[in-house]
Amino acid sequence: MSFPHPRGFTIADSLVALAIVTFCAVTLVGVVPYAFDQTQHDAIESQANAAGQQFLDTIRYDILNGIAVPASTTAPIDFGDSFMDSGVDSTTGNFTLTSSCIAQTSGLMEDCTVTVQWTENHATRQVVLETYVTELI
């Protein structure tokens, strides 16, 4: 007498599947805070680029109009809303923007750089932007 092939899952099969699902869930939960931190860092770096570009525009305007170029300035960092508690982030800080312009040998062009520095997660970060300013003839 032959028995039909058994159908369904054994308890061992179910335990293995449960272990795999639990491992995947724990891995995903561990990645979420990292993704939020990376998003916050990218937003701050975008603000640093925008502040540096605005400062370069001011420098370009000053050079073309014969105004003394500012050596440094600060700009506030907007940390936005906190991801974890749905409230406004109480963290404060400033970007420090410093500039340097070097006249080129032709005398009609200057190589200007702006360095934007800030502190994020107890580490100093920076972005350097550069442009050439040519005088109109």
Image: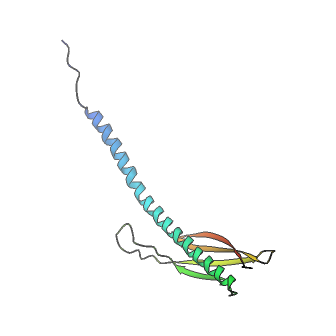
Q: Residue at x 62, y 76 (%)?
A: 56
Question: In x, y percent, where is residue 62?
Answer: 66, 84
How many labels were placed on the picture? 0
* Above or below, 25 relative to 52: above
Residue 4 shown left or right of residue 45 in the figure: left
Q: Residue at x 73, y 76 (%)?
A: 110
Please tell me in which quadrant of the rendered image residue 4 appears: top left
- Single out the residue that lies furthest toward the left: 1
Residue 79 shown left or right of residue 23 in the figure: right
- Single out the residue that lies furthest toward the front: 137
The front one of 46 and 125 is 46
The front one of 15 and 108 is 108
Question: In x, y percent, where is residue 104?
Answer: 78, 74
Question: In x, y percent, where is residue 97?
Answer: 61, 78
Q: How is the image coloured?
A: rainbow
The front one of 108 and 96 is 108
Residue 78 shown left or right of residue 103 in the figure: left
**Quarter of the image with the C terminus in it:** bottom right
The front one of 37 and 52 is 52
Question: In x, y percent, where is residue 81?
Answer: 39, 72
